[in-house]
Image (cartoon, rainbow, N blue to C red):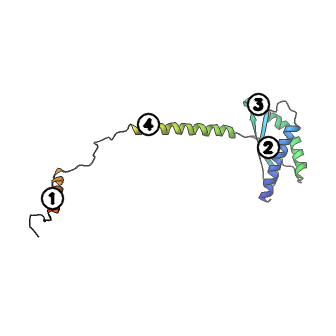
Amino acid sequence: MSDPAKVRRHAERVRELVASVVRSQIKDPRLGMITITDARITADLRDATVFYTVLGDAVAQADTAAALESAKGMLRSTVGKALGLRHSPTLTFVLDDVQDQVKHIDDLLAAARNADAEVQRLAAQAKYAGEPQPYRVDEDDDDADEADEADEATDTPRGGEAR
């Protein structure tokens, strides 16, 4: 088991090396506008996964994947020599679909915003289903309350007797 900091350093170095080699040494015409976004390497430093994005449509992405696959041997030997490890890590290239996920999340947020606005609009026009005063008020209680208030004002207890 390797030190996690060492693994992160090697992964960053793999990303830098692959990006440099792709930019300067690979002359494949199928290679599109590519950006190496991330690299991850296993704890035993044997397998590295390189994430990339391609500017363009599905055809450009497929062509770039084929170009990277054909240049994998050269990239692996360059990475192995530069890292100075006993075993050169095998490289796996994965199309990074972060932009598609960002667009999907933005669409979901817009839909939620629209749904919230619709709920707000409906709530502003809402009315009670029943009467404005849903509780029953006894009119007899109102008369008794008025009598209590009158008794308190004259300081006489109920029944009219003076203290």
| Residue labelled with disc 2 | 92
The mark lying in front, picked from 1 and 2, is 1
The disc placed on residue 150 is 1
Does label 2 or label 4 sit earlier along the sequence? 2
* Image quadrant containing the C terminus: bottom left
Residue sitting at 76 percent across and 30 percent down? 60
Do labels 3 and 4 touch, CB within 8 Å? Answer: no
Do labels 1 and 2 touch, CB within 8 Å? Answer: no
Q: Is mark 3 on a helix, strand or loop?
A: helix
| Residue labelled with disc 3 | 60
In front of the other: 60 or 124: 124
Instruction: Report the Cα–Cα distance between label 2 and label 4.
Output: 51 Å
Instruction: Report the Cα–Cα distance between label 3 and label 1.
Output: 91 Å
Coordinates of residue 52 in the picture (x, y in percent): 76, 40
Residue sitting at 87 percent across and 47 percent down? 79
| Residue labelled with disc 4 | 121
Which residue is situated farthest in the front direction here? 154
Callout 4: 10 Å neighbours few (<14), some, many (20+)? few
